[in-house]
Amino acid sequence: MLLAGDIGGTKTVLALFEVEAGASLITRHPVIERTFPSQQYQSLEIIVEEFLRDGDYAITAGSFGVAGPVVGDRAQVTNLPWVIKAGEMGERFGFDVHLLNDLEALATAVPHLEATDLITLNEGQPVARGAIGVIAPGTGLGEGFLVWNRGQERYDSYPSEGGHCAFGPTTPLQLEMLNYWLPRMGHVSYERVCSGIGIPNIYTFLRETGRYPEPDWLREQLADAVDLTPIIARAAVTGEAEICAATLELFMEILGDQAGNLALTVLATGGIYLGGGIPVRILPQLQKGPFMGFFQDKGRFSEMMSRIPVHVIYNPKTALYGTAYDALALTHG
């Protein structure tokens, strides 16, 4: 039995998975799964104790994908006062524990995904054992990648902080937006204009430069909201506000360009996978909008880019699967 966890500032999801025959796969559906409101608990250990309290489970390993930096066997959850130490948890619960970044967890699951877990934006021509890139616009912009391990005959996943690279505009409008935000931010990363925290920045630029009117009803909704992104995205998808539709269009241009940058950086001939909460919410716009055009528009490499498969990860349990497979690697190498 393997303990898998997806640890975030809002919720913590824990699940137990069984190892299938041959010890190289986990069961598709967890034996038990529970979701906990993270902020109501003082530590992950307390949640794990509550999760395991009512059962006698023979757990051989546990892995936790953490929304925050992981250094060695120690993790700090970004939006919680939790410090998680794998060694201490292992001693407390009696099985090996491993911590990994949430994007690394997402990437770990990619080789095990099925067709029903994905929506394909570009079939491409995948190269067997080619590198794979993962880019996930959620609250922030996460990135990761996988490379083939010849000795182990499997993919190994790695985290990246590519979302914090300096934003490079590719159109006059994007250049103007960079010039608008540069003196206000100092450093304008891709995350600042291509994520849940970035969408309001795009919107603010378009509003403050007078390109589109802001409807009164929209101004009132945004004034009362803690998180502006769902309101802007919803109005964009429904076509209720031109300024929101323009915001989403610019967001997709930048996301397509940065996904293409990741593909070039790791030579992702095995494909690019879009995770995070935003792509599944704007799927029709991604399918018909500017995303793929900006992804492929890489000058002399444009033809090669057209052959790279691009998929949206549609299964919300993907990061949980990733931690389960990471726990499996702890027990079987």
Image (cartoon, helix red, strand yellow):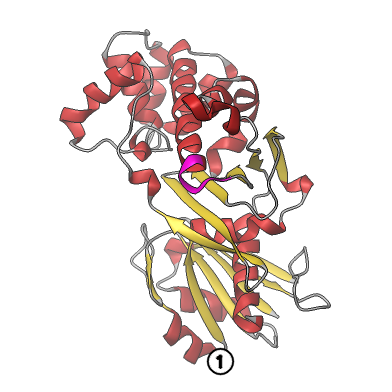
Q: Which residues are magenta?
A: 264-268
Q: Can you give x and y, in whole percent of width and height, for residue 156 in the image? A: 57, 64
Specify the principal SS of the magenta part.
helix
Q: Is residue 303 above or below residue 195?
A: above
Query: Where, quadrant-wise, is the N terminus in this rendering?
Result: bottom right
Q: Inspect this view and state whether residue 149 appears.
A: yes
Q: Position of residue 231 (x, y in %)?
A: 47, 28
Q: In front here: 217 or 228? A: 228
Q: Residue furthest right?
A: 21
Q: Which residue is mark 1?
A: 94
Q: Residue at x 64, y 47 (%)?
A: 270
The residue nearer to you, when weighing 20 against 204, is 20
Residue 319, by quadrant, is: bottom right
The image shows residue 26 at horizontal and vertical percentages of 74, 70
| Residue 122 position (above or below residue 328) | above
At which x and y percent is residue 171? 38, 17
Q: Residue 56 falls in which quadrant of the image?
A: bottom right
Residue drawn at x 15%, y 29% is 183
Taking depth in this image into account, of 231 and 172 the one nearest to the observer is 172
- SS assignment at label 1: loop
> Does the magenta run of residues contain 267?
yes
Q: Residue at x 27, y 15 (%)?
A: 208
For image coordinates 52% across by 54% down, the residue present is 145
Is residue 76 on the magenta stretch?
no
Quadrant (top left/top right/bottom left/bottom right) for the C terminus: bottom right
Residue in the foreground of this view, choosing between 51 and 207: 207
Structural crowding at the residue carrying mark 1, measured as other residues with C-alpha within 10 Å and reported as few (<14), some (14–19) or many (≥20): few
Can residue 11 be seen by looking at this rendering?
A: no
Q: Amino acid at mark 1?
A: Gly
